[in-house]
Image (cartoon, helix red, strand yellow):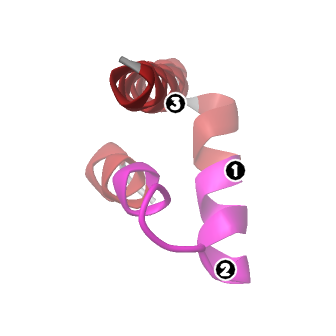
Amino acid sequence: MNCKQATQLLSEKLDRPLNAKEKVSLGVHTTICVSCRRFSHQVEELRTISKRYVEESKSE
């Protein structure tokens, strides 16, 4: 797996469950690739921030 494929899967992971092969390949890649691991953390953080924003907007 290359970085382009990994970042694509990391994005898709937000919208759908990954299959077993995708999970394993992505796990191996992000274990050895600092850039993709960082991208993964950034995507998760953006998701958290977005959810928090939506929740706070509903309560106003």
Classify 11 as above or below 41. Answer: below
In the image, the segment drawn in magenta is: 10-27
Q: CA distance from mark 2 to mark 1?
A: 10 Å
- How crowded pointer 3 is (Cα within 10 Å; few <14, some 14-19, many 20+) is rated as some
Q: In which image quadrant can residue 21 be found?
A: bottom right
Is residue 2 shown left or right of residue 37? left
Query: Where is residue 41 drawn, in percent x and y?
Result: 53, 22
Q: Which residue is mark 1?
A: 27
| Residue with the most extreme left position | 4
Q: CA distance from mark 3 to mark 2?
A: 21 Å
Q: Which residue is mark 3?
A: 44
- How crowded pointer 1 is (Cα within 10 Å; few <14, some 14-19, many 20+) is rated as some
Task: Report the label total.
Answer: 3
Q: Amino acid at mark 2?
A: Lys
Local SS, label 2: helix
Dominant secondary structure of the residues highlighted in magenta in the image: helix
Q: Earlier in the sequence, mark 3 or mark 2?
A: 2
Q: Residue at x 34, y 44 (%)?
A: 3
Query: Where is residue 59 drawn, in percent x and y?
Result: 45, 23
Q: Amino acid at mark 1?
A: Gly
Local SS, label 1: helix
Classify 16 as above or below 54. Answer: below
Q: Earlier in the sequence, mark 3 or mark 1?
A: 1
- Camera-side mark, 3 or 2: 3
Q: Amino acid at mark 3?
A: Glu
Q: Quadrant of the N terminus?
A: bottom left
Q: Quadrant of the C terminus?
A: top left
- Residue 21 is labelled as 2
| Circles 3, 2 touching at the beta carbon (< 8 Å) | no
